[in-house]
Amino acid sequence: MITGKNYIGNQLSAKGNNTYKTFNPQTNTENSSVFTEATSEEINLATELATSAFQSYSKKSGKEKALFLRTIADEIENLGDELLHVYTSESGLPAGRAMGERGRTLGQLRAFAAHVEEGSWVDATIDTAQPERQPIPKVDLRKMNVPLGPIVVFGASNFPLAFSTAGGDTAAALAAGCSVIVKSHPMHAGTGELVASAVIKAAEKTGMPNGVFSNLNSSGIEVGQQLVKHPQVKGVGFTGSIRGGRALFDLAAQRDEPIPVFAEMGSINPVVFLPEALHEGAESWAKTYAGSITLGSGQFCTNPGLLLGIKGERLNDFAQTLAEEIVKVEPSCMLHPNIVGAYNSNKSKAVSQEGLEVLADFKGDSKTNYGRQIVSKVEGKTFLNNPTLHHEVFGPFSLLVECEDKTQLEQILNKLEGQLTGTIVATDSELTLNSEIVSALQNRVGRIIFNGVPTGVEVCPSMQHGGPYPASTDSRFTAVGVDSIKRWVRPFSFQSWPNSLLPNELKNENPLKILRNINGNKTTDKI
């Protein structure tokens, strides 16, 4: 049952006077539940509890944290159809998407459980003492990753489950041994509360300290600002706009003790089409990309917003078929009237730029809050000289850039901002002959794709979901997959420490039987 209250640890609380409701974009009406925004008093209490809980939770074994994470997944699953109903009513997304995203959320939690249960993720490194070394004896040093402290996670608008309350950031932080405070996204506060209730039940069932998790409501930016500035908070996870992520990044840097903000932000995910590949399959690729651009009404962070090719008949054929195919796709519901409004405003700004030609614009009937797709075209020189055209239009929009030649194509790639993904559609021989283009694209992205589409992010250890700024605030880390745990830890060394008092990960006996680096050799052996 949705109460509209905040979870301050395991207690429901609603001390504030500011209230709000979520919105159903499919019916274009407010939902009935009323949510109460967290007060400064509640924020302080949540951070105090998180700090206290961290002292004991950070010392939990991998097996204990794994049980907690698996129990969270079980409790989310136990919410059943109620969760799916609230999800769809707050997002306008279909039931199939809700079930798929729930499955991804459960999979992430269970993957992190297996990861920390096995234990080698701590990167234990041991250099044993050499007291006889001359001229200076060598001391015993042992290093491993330890959790940062209380983490604030901001729910994402476009993924009410997988990137929100118990999504990837939360799962990774809890796996690392950090306590978590979620700033629930106001567009899906009901979904957030239901998931929060599952996390709290799991914490109680597995004996986790009160305050290991809290969930705070907020309709504006004030609660988030207070959390990021709070001296007891040690890190921030964010998925959203460049403007929002940069504001949090700057706020965290201005603190007396600056803290890391791992923000996954805007991306137009450039796609390069080389001529031979288009000669062999222009029609097929156009149909594929018509689907990718409009998938989920373009509300994926990996939506292909920029298409690049070299002028000529082959690119013309591709552009014509893409224009024909994209208007055959029925528009779908966007997440909220505010997102629809921003999309319409940003696409109008884009298409009003000098030199831009609209190739296809859906003109048929569509419901309120449905995103009408559009594909436009521009010359390479115009694109280079107009930074406005480099900005993301969040929604079913894509811009095709006609480059004069390979030199101009490479020049454009070198001048792009950082992106989450880059794609090359080419034959094998083209790929070999265009190493400069491949290198230029590789330098601007976190993941490069060959003959595919960027939409669809596999959750696995090899996935890199991040990229040079502004795709993310730190391109060294991923926001997807078990390696995202590395955002919420810091390396810590013990020097000449008694073996009996070392963490199990660093003891001579290696009681956890994890893989360790001992004197330069990776092994599971004892010392």
Image (cartoon, grey):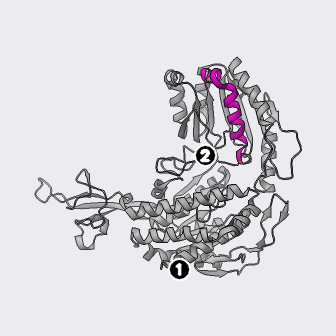
- Residue 292 horizontal side relative to residue 24, left or right: left
Q: Which residue is mark 2?
A: 456
Residue nearest the observer in this picture, 92 or 40: 92
Rendered view: 251 above or below 223: above
Pick the quarter of the image with the N terminus: bottom right
The label number, if any, that marks residue 345 in the structure image: none
Q: How many marks?
A: 2
Tell me the residue at 81%/72% (across/down).
Answer: 32
First in sequence: mark 1 or mark 2? Answer: 1
Q: Which residue is mark 1?
A: 204
Q: Is residue 275 magenta?
A: yes
- Residue 109 horizontal side relative to residue 132, left or right: right
Q: Quadrant of residue 358?
A: top right
Pick the quarter of the image with the C terminus: bottom left
- Whole-percent x and y of residue 147? 43, 65
Q: Quadrant of residue 101?
A: bottom right
Q: Is residue 373 magenta?
A: no
Real-space Cα distance between discs 1 and 2?
A: 35 Å
Residue 254 in view, yes or no = no
Residue nearest the observer in this picture, 460 or 480: 460
Determine crowd level at label 2: few under 14, some 14-19, many 20+ residues with C-alpha closer than 10 A: few
Name the amino acid type tagged 1.
Glu
Residue 61 in view, yes or no = yes
Tell me the residue at 61%/41% (across/down).
Answer: 454
Residue nearest the observer in this picture, 292 or 218: 292
Q: What is the magenta range?
A: 274-295
Name the amino acid type tagged 2.
Gly
